[in-house]
Image: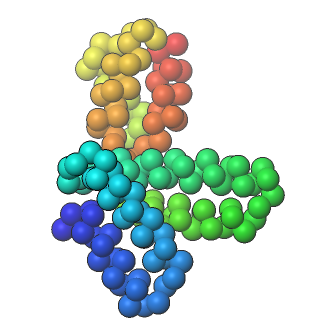
Amino acid sequence: MSLKERIQNDVKTAMRAGERERLGALRLILAAVKQREVDERITLDDAQVLAVLEKMVKQRRESVASFEAGGRADLVAKETAELQLIQSYLPTPLSESELDALIGGVMAETGASSIKDMSKVMAAVKAKAAGRADMAAVAVRIKARLG
């Protein structure tokens, strides 16, 4: 079963169970997936659906930070709940040691030795850690190791 089908099945389950908040968040996910399919006139595969979910996670994190700064606890709770639901569809994140090992392996493969090689390392790590690591944090780690 594809990731998109799993989300669609969860929408049906949430409808039957009367889970309004969960249903709303699931519909937001499906709307984002369908919007990208319509915009690009394609059917998304699992990797592309993961990319949509990663973008939604990033948006929710930014929203939570903004709402916390503005003192809006009600909106922080709503966004946090959506964030947790979206993250439940992402693969398990890499641990710190796994991420360090991945970065080290990619640096060895590409022969990266200076900050000039950062784009090569980032591209390779992004391909291998798709959906399993925050790429902004990965960039900071790579920069520290190369710099």
Camera-nearest residue between 126 and 50: 50
* Residue farthest toward the right in the current orientation of the protein: 71
Residue 136 vs 33, above or below: the answer is above
Residue 142 vs 66, above or below: the answer is above
Residue plotted at (52% across, 47% down): 58
Q: Position of residue 110 (x, y in %)?
A: 28, 17
Q: Is residue 65 left or right of residue 38?
A: right
Residue plotted at (35% across, 47% down): 51
Q: Position of residue 39 (x, y in %)?
A: 31, 47
Residue plotted at (41% across, 17% down): 118
Q: Position of residue 56 (x, y in %)?
A: 47, 52
Residue 65 vs 11, above or below: the answer is above
Identify the image quadrant of residue 92: bottom left
Quarter containing the N terminus? bottom left
Residue plotted at (38% across, 19% down): 119
Residue 78 vs 130, above or below: the answer is below
Q: Position of residue 135 (x, y in %)?
A: 45, 36
Camera-nearest residue between 142 and 8: 8
Residue 90 shows in this picture:
no
Residue 142 shows in this picture:
yes
